[in-house]
Image (cartoon, rainbow, N blue to C red):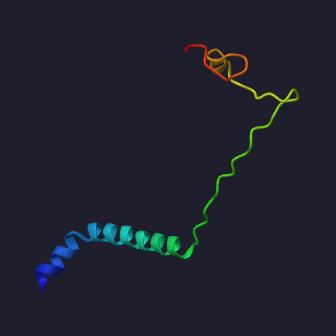
Amino acid sequence: MEALIDFLLNNYVWFLIVCLVMLFALIGYFVDSNNPKVSKKKVIKPIQNTEDNTFKVHPSVEAYTNEDFDEPLMK
């Protein structure tokens, strides 16, 4: 019994650290389990037309297509 008490007295800092870490983990688990999960749905906004009823196109995309955007320049 004295050997156990000597071991605990020599290593009490390690036991204290492990107990604190486990206590914080337990508190975190209870906090997470009690809060309901809120799912955030992404809302996709439709593309808005400009005044002349054409879509805005990035210049790099425009370089590879014709003016009507129906057929690529290269066949």
Q: Quadrant of the N terminus?
A: bottom left
Horizontal and vertical percent position of residue 39 = 60, 62
Please give the name of the residue rendered at 63% of the width and 58% of the height, measured from the top-left corner.
40
Horizontal and vertical percent position of residue 35 = 57, 72
Q: Nearer the viewer, residue 10 or 37?
A: 37
Please give the name of the residue rendered at 47% of the width and 69% of the height, measured from the top-left corner.
28
- Residue projecting furthest to the front: 75
Q: Nearer the viewer, residue 32 or 75?
A: 75
Q: Is residue 63 left or right of residue 54?
A: left
Q: Is residue 32 left or right of residue 18?
A: right
Q: Is residue 36 left or right of residue 9?
A: right
How many marks on residues? Answer: 0
- Residue projecting furthest to the right: 51
Q: Nearer the viewer, residue 11 or 18?
A: 18
Horizontal and vertical percent position of residue 38 = 61, 65
Q: Is residue 16 left or right of residue 62?
A: left
Horizontal and vertical percent position of residue 66 = 68, 16
Please give the name of the residue rendered at 40% of the width and 73% of the height, measured from the top-left corner.
23
Q: Quadrant of the C terminus?
A: top right
Whether 41 is drawn above or below 17: the answer is above
Q: Nearer the viewer, residue 73 or 37?
A: 73
- Residue projecting furthest to the bottom: 1
Q: Looking at the rendering, which quadrant does residue 59 occupy?
A: top right
Q: Looking at the rendering, which quadrant does residue 5 occupy?
A: bottom left
